[in-house]
Image (cartoon, grey):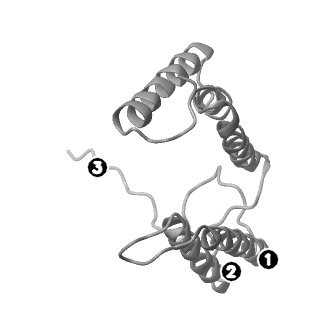
Amino acid sequence: MSTHTEDPPVTDEPVEPDRPPAAGPVTNLVIALIVVVLGGAALAGSLSLGVGTPSAPGPGTWPALVSTALVILGLVLAARARRTDDAERFTRAGLLVVAAVASMAVFVAVVGEIGFEIPTALLAFLWLRFLGRESWRTSTALSLLLTIAAYLLFVGALDVTIPHMF
């Protein structure tokens, strides 16, 4: 006696009932242009730092390479804007991404003024508690442990010259 059940029918459409609606070509193009503009701005900033030469790279070498990649990828996204249908329409859930980027911008702005320990602990706590929805206890413990680990790694072991309090 076989207990085999019949397999569900195979279709070309994915079965994702909770997936947000797809973004349209205009949204795809706008996002691609934002990527190009941000990459271009980063490229201009990195060039102002000086890229040096292949044998003696300057401080702007890696930022220039990454920002050039952003510009190229943004142009590819723009070229594919009409054919891309796997991008999701911006919804309220997308505000979490905006909050993450804004908190990272605040982190970068204050780390030079007060050191990295307090901003690192606060950023980790905010991301864990509010973006990751971890408990208060877990968020507090992990943010402190992460800050200690970052301090030991960057300041203690690697002797990186970053602003720090201790």
Q: CA distance from mark 3 to mark 1?
A: 47 Å
Q: Which one is nearer the viewer's eye here, 141 or 131?
A: 141
Q: Which one is nearer the viewer's eye here, 9 or 3?
A: 9
The residue where tag 2 is placed is 81
Where is residue 149 shown, x and y percent of the image? Answer: 42, 28
Where is residue 87 shown, x and y percent of the image? Answer: 65, 66
Disc 2 to disc 1: CB gap under 8 Å: yes
- Please say if 151 is above or below 66: above
The residue where tag 3 is placed is 4
The N terminus appears in which quarter of the rendering? Answer: top left
Mark 2 residue type: Ala
Q: Which mark is residue 26?
A: 1
Mark 3 residue type: His
Q: Residue at x 66, y 40 (%)?
A: 112
Q: CA distance from mark 2 to mark 1?
A: 7 Å
- Please say if 55 is above or below 146: below
Disc 3 to disc 1: CB gap under 8 Å: no
- Please say if 136 is above or below 21: above
Q: Residue at x 48, y 27 (%)?
A: 146
- Could you tell me which secondary element the residue under label 3 belongs to? loop
**Does label 3 or label 1 sit earlier along the sequence?**
3
Mark 1 residue type: Val
Q: Residues within 10 Å of mark 2 (few under 14, many from 20)?
A: many
Where is residue 137 shown, x and y percent of the image? Answer: 57, 13
Q: Residues within 10 Å of mark 1 (few under 14, many from 20)?
A: few
Q: Can residue 11 be spotted in the picture?
A: no
**Does label 2 or label 1 sit earlier along the sequence?**
1
Where is residue 26 shown, x and y percent of the image? Answer: 79, 76
